Image (tube, rainbow, N blue to C red):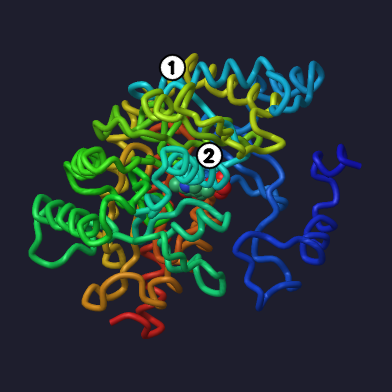
């Protein structure tokens, strides 16, 4: 029964069922059907997870950067149950429901500028997909059918629908999928770690801006519909663009009437100490902000985008040409999901979690930075409660060799045994803990990382893998 599974009975049966029947994201097709190398988690509380063996684990990535208020908050569980028993579903095509209206208003109140309308989806991919399709719809209604190209960036990640995967520039997600599209143009990643040698931060910013200007010149502004950018590239490895990059890219987009879509699926809902990072951290008011993950603290799926009144006004009312934004989901504004979103926002506000993140983030960054003295650590970088420790075995060879990835996997395993979840992205240990993390828990995280990186380095040297 559901109750038995939820209670964690018969964990070996669940593992066997997964092995036989579950196709997971990023499944190794070579190992399909073999014993899963994903541990079975049975319980969570605050920043802690517990696996079937009863091991207590500090959740470094906060699930998938999404468990903002932490696991097992009764307020969210109760809101979900209460809404499910009041009205569990209503069709967004024909009806309104209280939770989606209230959550839209609440989100509109904390977005920058005039981003006052919210469209709800089922998660991050559907949020970004809908925002990109809004751009297409918008330009068609405006009579600019040729203005559709999407400017995106290498190492960006925006989702797993066809269009969002196509605008995701992370090499690892692309093999064997048909993602080449003529209306997508990739710009360089704003990666300070791999910037051309001899360039300081300001020169690197100039370099990226010059590339953007040249691209617009080459393609023609009349053919470009939008620029999509994560304020901090998350899955690409916590890439914080150089100072001034956000404002300058926005200014160029405005000059050419190119919509600026800020993908805040990771950076939204407190990750950088504010509801959204675009304006309060990076000083920009984009045209559209996409969000997901932290909106419900990961309790149930929900995503969406907030869009500016000024943009909507250009194709609304008399200017609409009788058009319908005929894009939507059965679960757009799902009342149970939106009730969870409201409860999560209540907690973030009531517990002062934005203030807590602003207070604790400098400590988190400083403690992670202490790892830079380890020989295997090539770079430590971050912003707010996002941090990345990049493993580089041989600095002369540059970043992310197969050896780096192999050693990072060993570090991951050792951290797990010592009680810390890392789940690296290739050679990057990305730490993105729940917003409720304490100084003591940060100390534990950094202590386990230090021990594990050191021990893996010693063993690799003994094996002759390292000089
Ligand atoms: N956008 C960004 C910046 C993301 O990091 C992700 C997921 O990691 C997505 C979009 C896609 O979100 P989802 O996995 O909820 O579809």
Please name the residue that numbered disc 1 is placed on. Answer: 109
Choose between 102 and 142: the one closer to the eye.
Answer: 142
Name the mark on residue 27. Answer: none
Q: Give the residue drawn at x 53%, y 41%.
A: 127
Residue 215 percent coordinates (x, y): 24, 59
| Residue 61 can be seen in this image | no
Residue 105 percent coordinates (x, y): 51, 16
Q: Does the residue labelled 1 lie within 8 Å of ligand 1?
A: no
Q: Earlier in the sequence, mark 2 or mark 1?
A: 2
Mark 2: few, some, or many residues within 10 Å (few <14, many ≥20)?
many
Residue 299 percent coordinates (x, y): 64, 34
Q: Give the residue drawn at x 35%, y 24%.
A: 112
Secondary-structure class at tag 1: helix
Please name the residue that numbered disc 2 is placed on. Answer: 66
357 relative position to 12: left or right: left
Residue 439, located in which quarter of the rendered image? top left
Label 2 with label 1: CB-CB less than 8 Å: no
């Amino acid at each position: 029964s559901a109750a038995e599974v939820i209670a964690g009975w018969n964990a070996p049966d669940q593992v066997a069922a997964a092995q036989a029947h579950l196709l997971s994201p990023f499944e190794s097709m070579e190992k399909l059907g073999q014993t899963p190398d994903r541990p079975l988690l049975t319980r969570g509380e605050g920043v802690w997870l517990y696996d079937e063996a009863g091991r207590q684990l500090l959740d470094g990535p906060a699930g998938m950067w999404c468990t903002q208020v932490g696991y097992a908050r009764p307020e969210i569980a109760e809101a979900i149950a209460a809404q499910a028993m009041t009205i569990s579903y209503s069709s967004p095509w024909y009806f309104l429901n209280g939770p989606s209206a209230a959550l839209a208003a609440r989100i509109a109140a904390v977005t920058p500028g005039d981003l006052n309308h919210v469209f709800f989806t089922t998660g991050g991919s559907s949020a970004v997909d809908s925002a990109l399709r809004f751009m297409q719809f918008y330009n068609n209604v405006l009579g600019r059918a040729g203005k559709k190209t999407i400017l995106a960036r290498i190492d960006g990640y925006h989702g797993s629908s066809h269009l969002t995967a196509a605008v995701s520039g992370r090499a690892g997600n692309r093999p064997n999928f048909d993602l080449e599209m003529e209306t997508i143009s990739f710009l360089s990643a704003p990666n300070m770690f791999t910037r051309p040698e001899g360039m300081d931060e300001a020169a690197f910013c100039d370099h990226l801006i010059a590339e953007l200007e040249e691209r617009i010149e080459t393609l023609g502004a009349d053919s470009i519909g939008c620029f999509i950018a994560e304020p901090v590239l998350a899955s690409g490895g916590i890439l914080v663009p150089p100072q001034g990059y956000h404002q300058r890219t926005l200014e160029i987009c405005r000059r050419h009437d190119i919509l600026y879509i800020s993908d805040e699926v990771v950076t939204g809902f407190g990750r950088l100490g504010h509801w959204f990072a675009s304006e309060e951290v990076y000083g920009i008011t984009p045209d559209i902000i996409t969000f997901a993950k932290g909106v419900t603290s990961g309790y149930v799926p929900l995503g969406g985008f907030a869009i500016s009144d000024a943009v909507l006004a250009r194709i609304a009312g008399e200017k609409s040409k009788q058009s319908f934004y005929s894009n939507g989901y059965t679960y757009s504004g799902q009342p149970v999901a939106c009730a969870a979103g409201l409860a999560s926002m209540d907690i973030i506000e009531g517990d002062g979690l934005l203030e807590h993140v602003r207070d604790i983030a400098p400590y988190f960054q400083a403690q992670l930075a202490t790892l830079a003295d380890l020989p295997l650590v090539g770079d430590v970088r971050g912003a707010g409660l996002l941090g990345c420790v990049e493993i580089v075995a041989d600095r002369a060879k540059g970043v992310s060799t197969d050896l780096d990835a192999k050693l990072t996997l060993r570090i991951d395993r050792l951290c797990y045994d010592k009680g810390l979840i890392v789940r690296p992205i290739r050679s990057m240990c990305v730490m993105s803990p729940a917003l409720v993390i304490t100084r003591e828990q940060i100390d534990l995280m950094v202590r386990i990382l230090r021990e594990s990186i050191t021990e893996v380095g010693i063993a690799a040297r003994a094996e002759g893998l390292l000089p």
